Image (cartoon, rainbow, N blue to C red):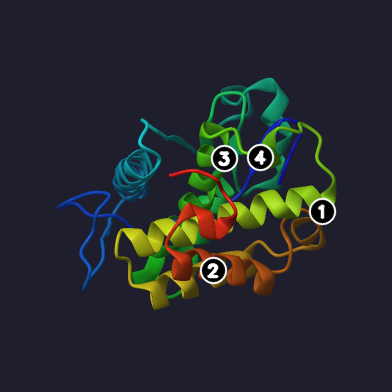
Amino acid sequence: MLPAVAIAVLTACSTRVAGTGNARHGPSCPGPSTTAIVSCLQTSLANYWSQVLAQKVSVQVVLAPATADVPRDCRDAVLVHTAFTCSSDDRVYVTAPYIARLRSATPAADVSYRFAATLGHEMGHVVQFAVHAPLVENDHPSAAQSQQIEQQADCLSGVWAAGVGLDMSRFIAAANEVFELIDSDFERTLHGTPAVRIGAVERGANGASPHSCGLAAG
């Protein structure tokens, strides 16, 4: 979603070697709290993309933000009740209603994977900003351009998930659940259908490189 200059939504990570994972078992961010899961994921995402891009890339996730916590030009995104990345401060915001939906969805054991599917996508936007991807240079993209931006972020989430060794069947299932959870005419206009978005995630996972997502970086 692209509210004004903001780019919105959509991510587990290792408590042992955050950002690198384990080829057989993948990273794990079990929580139990949302804060613990998100902190673990932030570390994995920042470590992985900093290594891939050969530059420091950090991400700050703000949980359950009040409207006043968000830069003025991104505040409309709070009303959508999902997650979004604001280009004004490069922060990721995860709204309280969306957190509740991720935690109450089933299976309960995959809550960290639902957060992984969400934050992996949002970090895709942070990466786009970091490399000044041409797609995000326009502050007021058309619906078609918005879909390109969002699906590239989906693709980059797949690159990260495969790169850190997540269980890809669980990650894909969690991403699909997240896409279905937030599916609406509005989401489809700016992001595409859940099926198209899952295809983008799988393309990133199979390509294992930003280049497979059309991003000239790394």
* Mark sitting earlier along the chain (3/4): 4
Helix, strand or loop at label 4? It is strand
Residue 80 is situated, as x and y percent measured from the top left of the image, at 70, 46
Q: Is residue 183 visible?
A: yes
Residue 81 located left or right of residue 201: right
Which residue is rendered at x = 74% and y = 34% of the image? 76
* Mark sitting earlier along the chain (2/3): 3
* Mark sitting earlier along the chain (4/2): 4
Residue 212 is situated, as x and y percent measured from the top left of the image, at 53, 60
The residue nearer to you, when weighing 187 against 135, is 135
Q: Name the residue tied to disc 3.
A: 128
Residue 131 is situated, as x and y percent measured from the top left of the image, at 53, 35
Residue 142 is situated, as x and y percent measured from the top left of the image, at 85, 45
Helix, strand or loop at label 1? It is helix
* Mark sitting earlier along the chain (1/3): 3
Q: Name the residue tied to disc 1.
A: 144
**Tag shown at residue 7:** 4
* Furthest-left residue in this view: 16
The span from disc 2 to disc 3 (Cα, nearest Å) is: 17 Å
Helix, strand or loop at label 3? It is helix
Q: Name the residue tied to disc 2.
A: 203
Which circle, 4 or 2, is nearer the viewer?
A: 2
For mark 1, does the 10 Å Cα neighbourhood hold few (<14), some (14 to 19), or many (20 or more) residues?
A: few
For mark 2, does the 10 Å Cα neighbourhood hold few (<14), some (14 to 19), or many (20 or more) residues?
A: many
The span from disc 2 to disc 1 (Cα, nearest Å) is: 19 Å
Amino acid under disc 1: Ala
* Furthest-right residue in this view: 142
The span from disc 4 to disc 1 (Cα, nearest Å) is: 14 Å
